[in-house]
Amino acid sequence: MARLGETLVRVTKAGPPATGGVARVAIFLALVSIAACSDGATSRSNSMLVPVPKISVPSAVPPIKARDWQYLWTRVRGSRKHECVAVDAGWTAARSDTFVVGNFAAYIRSWDGTVTTSKLAYTPRYPDAAQPPLRVKAAPLDGQPASPTAGVVFVSYAWGEDGIPFYATGTLLPHRGRWRLIATAGLNWGCFDFTI
């Protein structure tokens, strides 16, 4: 089965210089180190760069900060692969494929089945100006009944102070237990397993 957005999340690795000896390798490494320490646009090797999306933001929202975008997609726990991620109760955020979702720690700690304590933010790796609806399906993993769980749809972005778009949700679950959330929106997909 083809994975949605498979070619879009592939990361290339920077290879060694094509020719040359130890001196050229040393110069190459020195240049990479200088670039990594500078405030310039290149702060990491090509294997770590995640392009900042070009998306129109409301006039009151600042443009996406490249440093925050890079952190989100290279440092948040989870997986960049198209697979379900087991979320630890202490994680504030988790990544699965092309979604970063959080704050799981607060959600798990405070959950009481109300909208007030059931908020999760879903950040898409590929935001789209058309703002495709976010669909979240919840399924129990511990044998408890799924009813009355149904799919939830959210239709527009909220914007963080860092300019990053996300879907703000009330992800209501009917009871405590082990759950799987599967989120989709346009090219974005993510799967998160956790216990409340």
Image (spheres, grey):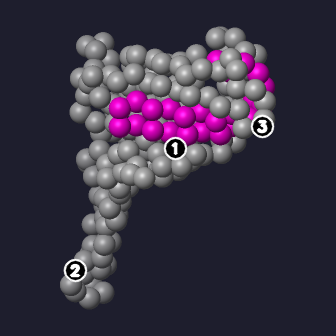
The answer to which image quadrant residue 140 occupies is top right
The mark nearer the N terminus, 3 or 2, is 2
Residue at figure coordinates x 53%, y 49% from the top left: 83
Residue 35 lies left or right of residue 162; in this view the side is left
Residue 142 appears in the rendering:
yes
Mark 1 Cα-neighbour bin, 10 Å: few <14, some 14–19, many ≥20? many
The magenta stretch spans residue 44? no
- Between label 1 and label 2, give the one nearer the viewer: 1
The mark nearer the N terminus, 1 or 2, is 2
Residue at figure coordinates x 77%, y 37% from the top left: 142
Farthest bottom residue?
A: 21
Residue 114 lies left or right of residue 68; in this view the side is right
Q: Nearer the viewer, residue 49 or 79?
A: 79
Q: Secondary structure at mark 1?
A: strand
Q: Nearer the viewer, residue 108 or 172?
A: 172
Residue 62 appears in the rendering:
no
- Between label 3 and label 2, give the one nearer the viewer: 3
- Between label 3 and label 1, give the one nearer the viewer: 3
- Magenta stretch: dominant SS? strand
The residue tagged 1 is: 96
Q: Which mark is residue 142?
A: 3
Q: Secondary structure at mark 3?
A: loop
* Residue type at the position of mark 1: Ser
Q: Position of residue 150 (x, y in %)?
A: 60, 20
The residue tagged 2 is: 18
